[in-house]
Image (cartoon, grey):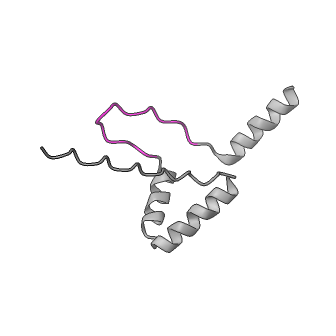
Amino acid sequence: MFQTMNIFFKSAKARQIEPLTVPSADGAPQQYSVKIEKLVEEISKMTLLEVSELSTALKTRLNLPDAPVMMGGFAPAAAPKD
C-alpha cells in the first residue's frame, strides 16, 4: 500500500499540479487558471470544422458517448373557435 501511495505522490510532483481554486460566489466573475485561459484562447481561434474535429477526438479519447438528441414535442392543436 505504501509503495502505491509513494508512486502516486512522485507522479503528482512530476505533473506539477496547480492548486485548486475556491469557486466564486454567484454573480461574481469566474477566475480560471492560466492553463485554462490558454486553452480557451487557442480554441476560440479555431474554425468550426476544427472545433468539430476536436470534439470528436476528445469523445474518442475519453470514451464518451454521443449526447442523445431530444425529440421535439408536437404543438397542441389550436382551440376551436366559437
Q: Residue furthest front?
A: 82
Residue at the image position 64 percent from the left and 52 percent from the top: 65
Residue at the image position 63 percent from the left and 57 percent from the top: 59
Q: Position of residue 19 (x, y in %)?
A: 54, 37
8 shown above or below 42: above
Residue 29 counted in the magenta span: yes
Q: Residue furthest left?
A: 82
On the picture, is 51 further left or further right than 14? left
Foreground pick, 7 / 48: 48
Quadrant containing the N terminus in the rendered view: top right
Q: Position of residue 32 (x, y in %)?
A: 43, 46
The image quarter in which residue 8 lies: top right
The image quarter in which residue 37 lies: bottom left
Residue 77 counted in the magenta span: no
Q: Residue furthest top?
A: 1
Foreground pick, 51 / 36: 51
Quadrant containing the C terminus in the rendered view: top left
Q: Position of residue 9 (x, y in %)?
A: 74, 35
Q: How many marks?
A: 0
Residue at the image position 56 percent from the left and 52 percent from the top: 67
- The magenta segment: 18-32
Q: Position of residue 3 (x, y in %)?
A: 87, 31
On the picture, is 23 further left or further right than 5? left
User: Predominant secondary structure in magenta?
Assistant: loop
The image quarter in which residue 79 lies: top left
40 shown above or below 50: above
On the picture, is 31 further left or further right than 78? right
59 shown above or below 29: below
40 shown above or below 16: below
